[in-house]
Image: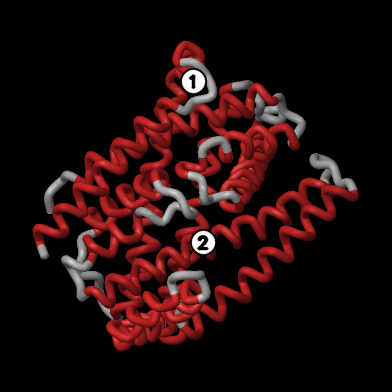
């Protein structure tokens, strides 16, 4: 078993390394232009990259709250080990298609060294659910931030914008309903039911259910029990995960300030710039997740930044700069995640 896990670890490692190479070779600009953008960022690259130390810390704390609520006691894993697995898991998520699910199998494999495999699986699934659940709350609350800015005359409101915002609200409310069902009844059986409807996979699904039905039942019970039995851990995890999105918005704010976009300066101007940054991140992540089947969301994230920044009345050149620097940051953190994968316990 240990040898098999080591082989899987190496597979994940080489997948991440390959992703770095692919990302470097798929920039829409030449290496000369890329270097010019990096030089333009200058010392701002330090806070742009460094802010993710805090983003990942919030993610790790959210996962910690989920694990403790799931196992019903103090987590038997050190925070620093969980922090390392968080960074590596997200590095793998950047590298894989289908909505970025490459990090979850790795997290389950590693966490099962510290707790039993069923609790490891349910904890990772619960955190993945929380990660997406927080995304929907981030998009939902961003709608009201936009409406507040409309009321103060900072943002436009047209019929087209109103329709788009309404569609996003309905989309989020539908997601809240589906998540509530998942948190009440578990999720694994539902996913297997969906997989069974895919042509050619029905027999495999039935065989898998026959072999692992008891374990699947236990995992779904553990998923459902978090919200029922430990609402404190549930809402703590949600708040921490939502806060990580807000902190992530500082990355865009730093780049706006670099271009002299400060909405008049002062505390009021900086607050307005930060709210604009939240809206940019919200629209871009919504756009990227809707088309999340692309590996590393190549081209999707860039397009999302350009569109969202242009929608705020800023130049497309700024959108291109933001997207390129964010891609550079991703490569750096993927490399860090791959290096941490090789750090021993």
Side of 153 where 248 appears, left or right: left
| Disc 1, SS | helix
Could you tell me residue 169's position as x and y percent? 73, 62
Q: Which mark is residue 132?
A: 2
Q: Residue at x 43, y 63 (%)?
A: 128
Quarter holding the N terminus is bottom left
Could you tell me residue 47's position as x and y percent? 43, 31
Q: Is 212 or 336 nearer to us in this picture?
A: 212
Residue under label 1: 41
Q: Which residue is drawn at 40% across and 27% down?
A: 24
From the viewer's perspective, is residue 332 above or below residue 87?
above
From the viewer's perspective, is residue 261 above or below residue 66?
above
- Check contact, mark 2 vs mark 1: CB within 8 A: no
Could you tell me residue 159's position as x and y percent? 90, 50
Q: Which residue is drawn at 48% across and 85% down?
A: 185
Query: Residue 143's image quarter?
Result: bottom right
Q: Which residue is drawn at 29% across and 78% down?
A: 71
């Amino acid at each position: 078993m240990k040898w098999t896990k080591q082989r899987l670890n190496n597979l994940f490692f080489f997948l991440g390394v390959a992703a770095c190479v692919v990302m470097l070779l798929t920039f829409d600009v030449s290496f000369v232009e890329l270097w010019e953008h990096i030089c333009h960022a200058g010392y701002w690259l330090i806070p742009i990259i460094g802010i993710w130390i805090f983003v990942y810390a919030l993610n790790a704390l959210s996962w910690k709250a989920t694990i403790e609520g799931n196992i019903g006691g103090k987590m038997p894993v050190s925070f620093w080990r969980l922090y390392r697995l968080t960074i590596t898991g997200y590095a793998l998520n950047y590298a894989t298609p289908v909505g970025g699910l490459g990090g979850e199998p790795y997290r389950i494999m590693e966490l099962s060294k510290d707790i039993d495999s069923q609790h490891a699986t349910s904890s990772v699934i619960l955190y993945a659910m929380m990660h997406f659940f927080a995304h929907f709350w981030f998009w939902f609350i961003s709608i009201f931030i936009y409406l507040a800015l409309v009321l103060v005359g900072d943002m436009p409101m047209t019929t087209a914008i109103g329709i788009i915002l309404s569609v996003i609200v309905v989309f989020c409310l539908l997601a809240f309903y589906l998540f509530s069902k998942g948190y009440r009844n578990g999720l694994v059986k539902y996913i297997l039911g969906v997989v069974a409807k895919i042509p050619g996979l029905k027999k495999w699904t039935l065989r898998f259910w026959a072999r692992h039905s008891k374990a699947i039942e236990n995992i779904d019970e553990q998923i459902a029990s978090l919200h029922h039995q430990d609402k404190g851990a549930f809402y703590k995890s949600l708040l921490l995960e939502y806060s990580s999105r807000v902190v992530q918005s500082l990355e865009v704010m730093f780049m706006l300030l670099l271009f002299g976009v400060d909405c008049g300066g002062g505390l009021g101007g900086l607050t307005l710039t930060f709210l604009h940054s939240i809206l940019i991140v919200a629209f871009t992540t919504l756009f990227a997740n809707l088309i999340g089947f692309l590996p590393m969301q190549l081209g999707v994230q860039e397009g999302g930044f350009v569109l969202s920044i242009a929608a705020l009345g800023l130049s497309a050149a700024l959108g291109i700069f933001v997207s390129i620097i964010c891609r550079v940051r991703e490569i750096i953190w993927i490399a860090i995640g791959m290096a941490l994968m090789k750090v021993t316990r």
